[in-house]
Image (cartoon, grey):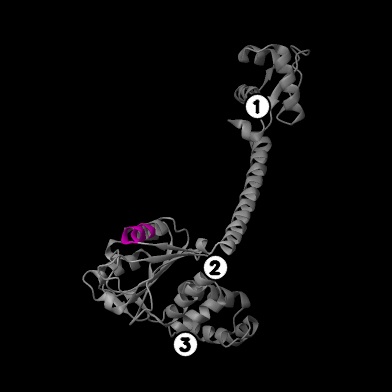
Amino acid sequence: MLEAVGLDPVEERVYRILVTAAEAGAADLAGELDLDAGTVETVLRSMETRGLVRAAPPDRAAPAERRFTPADPDIVLGAQLSRRQQSLDWARRTVEQLSEEYRGNARRRDAGRLVEVLPNRIALREQLEHLQENAREEVLCFCRGSAIVMHSTENDAELDALRRGVVYRVIYERDLLEEPGMQANVAYGVKLGEHARALPRLPVRLMVVDREIGLMPLVRHAGISEPTAALIRGGELLEALIALFESYWDRATPLRIAEDGALTEGTHPCPLNSDDLYLLSLLVAGVPDKSIASQLGISQRTVQRRLAHIMELAGAQTRMQLAWHAARERWL
């Protein structure tokens, strides 16, 4: 069990006995392990050299007998375990980098690795579920009316992904929101954390997972024929689709849940008081923190604390995101 930190099976047994007994001599250990004393002496000398055990003070009753005590496991084994874990982490990152380089080179050599055609409804539905089940961080979606293979109310994979912390940003066509059960379904997703917006029309159906792979039907109206779709892996085409999504996201109207639980379009009322609004206006105008503090008659630390609170309310990680959010939500 402790081979991962450099102990062979006999050394581990010796160390465990010493930890339990606190102190023991070679003869005691030999009897406990059913080994000859010479073998145990060799094992103890090796472990002493590596700092795993140390000699105990001589016993006045038996001064000729050399006895040993174990070193602290946290120090001698924990440190080795940490070093091995660090080495594994470095190796894992190197493998990931090499894998990404390999995939990138493979895609450049073979365009078929960039775009894979899914020939029917079954394959398309399986990929919709598979991509969401394996999503790690973020899913981007264009949702249009008249579902091809799966209605939004059937998409249990999204609910599971939301529950494990995957961020969903979804833009719905307004016609889709008029379909039976859709508003309640979207409202439930928003309660779980989905970021939902709406537009009158969307150009395509689209899903992008972790900005690494996209899924897009190739035919607008399949009718009774089998729909085909493209599975698009990292490359310029996927980057273009992500940029398309972001441009529509900026223009879309946020979908909120009203106090009565109904789904509504529009922005939240501004949660800031007049003092924080003034502070935010100075920030957006490009006034440095020191000047803001001087104008408001407060310390720079207080300015930074209040800005941190405003950023938390906006869900922004940077001041640039805060300014963008304030403009979008019309706080100023």
Which mark's residue is nearer the viewer, 1 or 3? Answer: 1
Residue 2: image location, x then y, percent: 61, 31
Task: Give the secondary structure at mark 3.
Answer: loop
* Circle number at residue 8: 1
Q: Which residue lies at the image location 46% right of the left edge and 64% below the top edge?
A: 138
Tag 3: amino acid: Leu
What's the magenta region? 120-127
The answer to whether residue 272 of the structure is visible from this angle is no
Position of residue 50 relative to residue 192, above or below, is above
Tag 2: amino acid: Gly
- Considering every residue shown, the one lying at the far left of the view is 180
Camera-side residue: 188 or 157?
157
**Count of numbered circles on the image:** 3
Tag 1: amino acid: Asp
Displayed quadrant of residue 230: bottom left
Task: Give the secondary structure at mark 1.
Answer: loop
The residue wearing badge 3 is: 332
Q: Viewed as shown, does residue 158 lie left or right of 24?
A: left
Q: CA distance from mark 1 to mark 2?
A: 49 Å
Position of residue 14 relative to residue 127, above or below, is above
* Circle number at residue 235: 2
Q: Which residue lies at the image location 69% right of the left edge and 11% below the top edge?
A: 36
Task: Give the secondary structure at mark 2.
Answer: loop
Displayed quadrant of residue 33: top right
Position of residue 86 relative to residue 190, above or below, is above
The answer to whether residue 173 of the structure is visible from this angle is yes
Q: Which quadrant, please, contains the N terminus?
A: top right
Which mark's residue is nearer the viewer, 1 or 2? Answer: 2
Q: Which residue lies at the image location 28% right of the left edge and 67% below the top edge?
A: 225
Contact, CB < 8 Å: mark 3 with mark 2?
Answer: no
Q: Which residue lies at the image location 44% right of the left edge and 84% below the top edge?
A: 331
